[in-house]
């Protein structure tokens, strides 16, 4: 089981979720390129197809067989693109709160963040206090956000602290995948988070109608970052789906 985080996040965003599956799966979470502890490419290489290329190399060469591939937000979009090209290499696919396309408005909004210089903080404590998710709405407990924040920043040679993220990742070049959904032949779960505006419910239903083996589930009492806002419900939804896999 391989977990793929969203944009500006890192593998530890799954810390509350992944351990629930270790009795049944070999569970891994990936820092995508430019995020967390992963290296940064010399030149900008952060299109959907760049991320998918990484997934192809990892899954083709790791020796664990076909995974259940789970993504959230940007990570879920990358999962959709990967699955549209490689569904025969997957046991199943789960996409959490992402549409198959990016609106031009979303792409331009993220570009406004990409061009800003990264903030620097005098201490890790100051950085942790400044930590916020995007979109901003969240029901997460303070201790959950603090745990994630402490794993989000790195110390520079001058002693200051800054986000581990390569801000160039915010310049997106998404691959539109509506027309390829019908090629995802593995069992597929689309998770719609009820309070989140990122994935419209009608779009989610349309996705499931196109997917050959698609299922839809909704999770309430959560905004976009469901692994923080309602981890219990997310774990339950993932367990219900994976229990149906052959």
Image: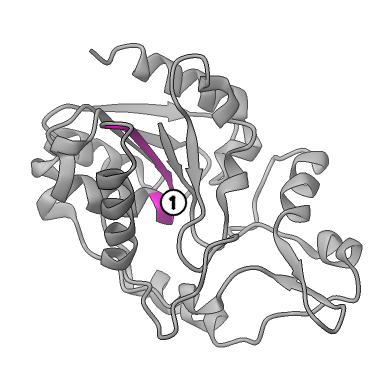
Residue at left 46%, top 50%?
197
Residue at left 16%, top 27%?
213
Determine whether, in the image, residue 121 is placed left or right of residue 202: right
Label 1 crowd (10 A; few <14 / some 14-19 / many >=20): many
Image quadrant occupied by the N terminus: top left
Position above or below: 164 against 197: below
Image quadrant occupied by the C terminus: top left
Q: How many marks?
A: 1
Return the x and y of residue 219 as percentages of the image width and height: 48, 29
Return the x and y of residue 34 as percentages of the image width and height: 50, 69
Is residue 225 among what the camera can see?
yes
Q: Which residue is mark 1?
A: 73
Return the x and y of residue 68 as percentages of the image width and height: 33, 31
Element type at mark 1: loop
Determine whether, in the image, residue 241 is placed left or right of residue 238: left
Report which quarter residue 129 is drawn in. bottom right
In this orientation, which residue lies closer to the viewer: 18 or 188? 18
Position above or below: 181 against 240: below
In this orientation, which residue lies closer to the viewer: 64 or 244? 64
Membership of 67 in magenta stretch: yes
Residue at left 26%, top 65%?
49
Determine whether, in the image, residue 36 is placed left or right of residue 95: right
Residue at left 69%, top 40%?
139
Determine whether, in the image, residue 7 is placed left or right of residue 149: left
Membership of 46 in magenta stretch: no
Return the x and y of residue 35 as percentages of the image width and height: 54, 63
Position above or below: 80 against 40: above
Report which quarter residue 89 is drawn in. top left
**Residue stretch in magenta:** 66-75
């Amino acid at each position: 089981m391989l977990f793929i985080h969203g944009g500006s996040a890192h593998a530890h965003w799954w810390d509350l979720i992944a351990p629930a599956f270790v009795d049944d799966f070999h569970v891994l979470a990936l820092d995508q390129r430019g995020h967390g502890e992963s290296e940064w490419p010399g030149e900008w290489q952060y299109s959907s197809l760049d991320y998918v290329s990484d997934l192809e190399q990892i899954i083709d060469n790791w020796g664990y067989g076909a995974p259940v591939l789970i993504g959230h937000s940007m990570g879920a979009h990358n999962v959709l693109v990967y699955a549209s090209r490689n569904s025969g290499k997957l046991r199943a696919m789960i996409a959490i709160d992402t549409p198959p396309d990016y609106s031009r408005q979303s792409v331009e909004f993220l570009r406004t963040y990409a061009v800003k210089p990264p903030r620097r903080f005098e201490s890790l404590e100051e950085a942790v206090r400044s930590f916020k998710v995007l979109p901003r709405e969240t029901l997460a407990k303070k201790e959950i956000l603090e745990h994630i924040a402490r794993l989000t920043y790195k110390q520079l040679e001058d002693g200051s602290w800054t986000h581990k993220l390569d801000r160039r990742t915010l310049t997106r070049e998404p691959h539109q995948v509506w027309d390829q959904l019908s090629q995802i032949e593995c069992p597929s779960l689309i998770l719609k988070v009820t309070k989140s505006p990122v994935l419209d419910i009608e779009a989610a239903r349309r996705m499931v109608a196109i997917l050959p083996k698609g299922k839809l589930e909704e999770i309430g009492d959560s905004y976009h970052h469901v692994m923080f806002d309602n981890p219990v419900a997310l774990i339950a939804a993932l367990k219900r789906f994976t229990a149906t896999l052959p």
